[in-house]
Image (cartoon, grey):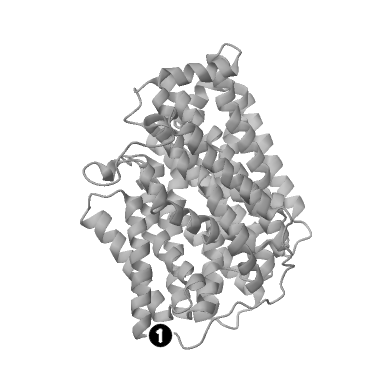
Amino acid sequence: MLSFISFLLFTGFVAYYATWSLRRDNLNTQDGYFLGGRSLTGIVIAGSLLLTNISTEHLVGMNGSAYKNGAIIIAWEVTSALALVIAALYFAPRYLKMGLTTIPEFLEKRFDSLTRTIVALLLIISFVATLLPIVLYTGALNIEAIFEISDLLNVNQQQGIWITIFIVGTIGAVYAIFGGLKMVAYTDTINGWGLLIAGLLVPILALWSIGKGNILEGIVEVFEKNPDKFNVVSRESGTGPGSRSAILPFEVLFTGLMINQVYFWTMHQSIIQRVLGAVNLKEAQKGLLFTGLLKILIPFVIVLPGLIGFYYFGDSLYNNPDSVYPLLVKKILPFWLTGFFVAVMMGAILSTFNSALNSAATIFSLGIYKKYINAKVEERGLVGVGRWTSTVLAVFAIGIAPFVANASEGLYQLLQQLNGIFFIPIASVIIAGFLFPKVSAVGAKAGLLFGLAFYITTYFIIKIELHFVHIWGIEFLLNIAVMHLVSLLYPRMNPFKITDIKVVDLKEWRYTKPFSAILIIITLMIYILLGNV
């Protein structure tokens, strides 16, 4: 009963605070609903970015991978700081200067409307087919394991997970449909702090228990159980036999991993939409760089518990690594705290789910509906279309979610493999749009379609003996080459120039460069200090 009360209290407080904060906002305008009225500050952006990114596929999936494969999985997190530096220094000033609402909007300005439409459709498909179902499923898995919903409702475990998916998906859809981006951002900020507190409690209490009241002795004991687990540099090979099942060979950090990170943190609509909603460039840069610092710290929440899980469970859960984190939470947390913890988990699920729904609705409403179906639609009507889009996509995601179970290398690995279908082709086109002025609209479309076909063919059909992140790197280079070759045959006629439309103040934050340098140094030091444990 205490756990259920703490769950209701925290969830209710988040809902009340967000609703109260929006009481004077006009959510029936385009900027008000889709961009939070361009009023987001650095702290709100950082909290929202962190929680949009960190959800149960990280808490469950990454801790499961760390339990089985060790700290090598940390690369997904700490290298994010480098991409966020690039976002703050290069992309944010240009996006805000153009006054963008969506990333596909840039592609129309740089190339043409068809390129924008193709990318918009790919983004919507990627949200519904990969991100949303995996977020819902891992969330349901966590809640079922901790609260035992199936026993409570007297149904089998599969039915319990189905019911949990439906309830969580419905609540998330309600937030996104009626509150827009600002509701999502405000709830994210509170839930983000809750996630950090609750997430850190798990390893702290575990190490306290293991060390008999001394956390340092606890971590020494966990380390001595298997020191190799703490090594952040993988000895796996990314080429040849066994490379397809490798988790994260160190060499991929220098091929496709950083391209993926740059895409996700500088071009992915659900992430960059917070930056587009910033009150000015200064706050956008603060938000991005604060997020970079949090990403360096977040392995204490989504990697260390997995290593502690190995101390407790040994290799007994190697065939089911995604059950490690929920079992550790049940073992470590006092019963009265589990309600608060599940509320935070719910917030993490809702954040990523809401963000993707809001982004997909923004892309469809502005990039497809207004462009091809009803060009004269008023702002209130456009917001209505956004709400209906969120509803339909939520229904699809809830229906698909139960079918993502049984991923052999873990759910987080599955998500990354599927993301490669969409992320790298889109990244190559956007990067070409900024860096290569001679690439034409025809060249961009050729590179986009080639990239999609190349990854699907090489990884899923031919199944070549290469790690999928290496394939990303090769694909990126080939995409750029294809775009240049086709552009020689179909050259661009008019040059593209970024113009300032005076939407927000573009004065840079004075600490942007020093803060960026600190993040780069810390990232490098992690690999120097933990690369030869």
Query: Where is the N terminus found, in terms of image quarters?
Result: top right
In the rendered image of this protein, does residue 229 appear above or below residue 73?
above
Amino acid type, callout 1 = Pro
Q: Residue furthest right?
A: 24
In front of the other: 489 or 159: 489
Q: Residue furthest bottom?
A: 493
Where does the image place residue 342, in percent across and percent down from the top left? 57, 34
- Position of 321 with respect to 81 (left or right) is left
Where does the image place residue 142, in percent across and percent down from the top left? 48, 35
Where does the image place residue 340, in percent across and percent down from the top left? 62, 32
Residue hosting label 1:
491
In the rendered image of this protein, does residue 467 appear above or below residue 68?
below
How many numbered discs, if any?
1
> Considering the numbered disc 1 on the image, is that residue within a helix, a strand or a loop?
loop
In the rendered image of this protein, does residue 375 appear above or below residue 523?
below
Where does the image place residue 438, in percent across and percent down from the top left? 45, 79
Q: Residue furthest top?
A: 212
Q: Residues within 10 Å of mark 1 (few under 14, many from 20)?
A: some
Asked if residue 155 can be seen in this view, the reply is no
Asked if residue 12 can be seen in this view, the reply is yes
Q: Residue at x 54, y 81 (%)?
A: 496
State which quadrant residue 510 falls in.
bottom right
Q: Residue at x 57, y 11 (%)?
A: 212
In front of the other: 25 or 47: 47
In front of the other: 367 or 487: 487
- Position of 375 with respect to 159 (left or right) is right
Query: Where is the C terminus found, in terms of image quarters?
Result: top left
Q: Residue at x 33, y 52 (%)?
A: 470
